[in-house]
Amino acid sequence: MTSSARPYLNRRLAEFGTTIFAEMSALAVTTGAINLGQGFPDTDGPEEIREAAVRALRDGRGNQYPPGPGIPELRNAIAAHQQHRYGLTYDPDTEVLVTAGATEAIAATLLALLEPGDEVVALEPYYDSYAASIAMAGGRRVPVTLRPDAGRFTLDLDELRAAVTDRTRLLLINTPHNPTGTVLTRAELAAIAELAVERDLLVVTDEVYEHLVFDDAEHIPLATFPGMRERTVTIGSAGKTYSFTGWKVGWVTAAPELVSAVRSAKQYLTFVSAGPFQYAVAEALALPDTYYDDFRRAMATRRDLLATGLTEAGFDVFRPAGTYFVTADIRPLGEKDGFAFCRALPERAGVVAIPNAVFYDDREAGAPFVRFAFCKKEEVLEEAVTRLRAL
C-alpha cells in the first residue's frame, strides 16, 4: 500500500461491493434456509438438450475456441426463433452475436455504445448489473421508477419523457421486468418507441424472460415497432427459458453496425465461451411451441402457489405477469426495512429472499419490498410457504 493509501477499486465501481445475491445465498448455506433469493431453478431443463451438450463434448464440437460471433448453428437458430416468434428477420452472419449470458451482452453493449458522460435512462428497480455496467462505461444512469398501482408496478410515461435530455444516449428497457414481474403493454411500448424515434435514441432491451409471461400478458419485442428495428439492441438468453443458467449462453440481435460495435467490446471481455453448450442451445431453440406452453403453465402453477402462500402469511403480494419472481410488501407484517427483514428471515423462518432496495437508486422507494423466486420444485415452495406462515 502506498503512503497515500489510495483505494484499489476505482471510483466508478466504488459503490459496488459483493452482490446481494452472493450474500443471501451464503446465508442460505450457513443457516440451511430455503433459497428463494437467487433466480436459478433447482431442476435441470429438458433431458434431450442436456444430452445434446454431452454429444457435442464427445464429438469434439466446441471443445476448442468457437467462432467469435458464435457457432453458425446457434446464430441460425437465434435468427429462426426471432422470425418464428415475432416476425423479425435477422441475418445470422451480421445481425446476431452470441455472448456469455445476458449479463455480458448488457456489459458489452453499454461499453460499446456509451461515451463518458452519456446518460442512460433505465426503469427502476433494475437488475444490479445495469448500474455496474453503466458505471464501467463511464455513463450516468437516470432512473425512471415503476410505482405500485392496482396490484402491479406501472410506468409513468410522462416521467419517462421528462427524464430524456440532450445528454441521453440510450434507453435501457427490461420487459418482462425483473424484479417487479411487470410486462409492458403494447401501448406503453408504442410510447417508448415514439419517444426513441423522436429523440433519436438507441434502445437496449433485456428480454431474457420473453417466454415467461402469464395470464393475458403478451411479450412484444420493442424492435417490432415502427422505426425501432434499426435502433434497438435486443438481448436474449437460454438460461431462463431452458433452465440451464450455468451454461451462460446469451445473444444480441440488432442491425449490422450495432452488432459490430458490441462485438468490438465483447471480444475483449470473454472473446468466446460455452462452446459445446452453443450446439445444445441451437437444438433447444428448435423445440416445438408446446415446450414453451408447458413451461409457462408449470411456472404459472408455481407462481400461484407462492403468491397465495405469501398472501396467507400476511404479505401484500404483487402477482407477476411475467418472470419467475414475486414482489411482496412487508409493511402489513409491521416491517419497513427490506434489508433487515431479509437478513433476519433465514433465522426467523428458514427462507431466503432478496430486498428490492438493492435494485433502486432511491433506496427508500424500494425499502418495503422483497423478492421471492418461484423457479423451484413445488414441494420446495410448499415447505417455504409453510415456514413463512409462522411469521
Image (spheres, grey):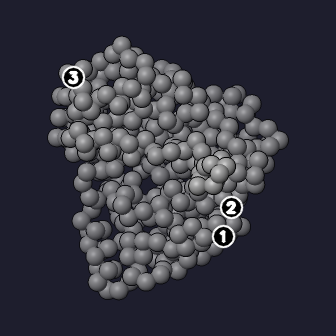
Callout 2 secondary element: helix
Of label 3 and label 1, which has the lower sequence position?
1
Callout 3 secondary element: loop
Q: Quadrant of the N terminus?
A: bottom right
Q: Quadrant of the C terminus?
A: top left
Callout 1 secondary element: helix
Of label 3 and label 2, which has the lower sequence position?
2
Residue 35 vs 145, above or below: the answer is: below
Question: Gap in Å between the C-alphas at discs 3 and 2?
Answer: 48 Å
Where residue 247 sits, quadrant-wise, is: bottom left
Question: How many discs mark residues in the rendered view?
Answer: 3
Q: Residue at x 32, y 45 (%)?
A: 26
Q: The residue under label 1 is which amino acid type?
A: Ser
**Residue corresponding to mark 1:** 264
Q: Residue at x 35, y 54 (%)?
A: 292
Residue 183 vs 256, above or below: the answer is: above
- For this view, does 217 lie left or right of residue 54? right
Where residue 215 sits, quadrant-wise, is: top left
Q: The residue under label 2 is which amino acid type?
A: Ala
Q: Residue at x 38, y 71 (%)?
A: 277
**Residue corresponding to mark 3:** 389
**Residue corresponding to mark 2:** 112
Q: The residue under label 3 is which amino acid type?
A: Arg
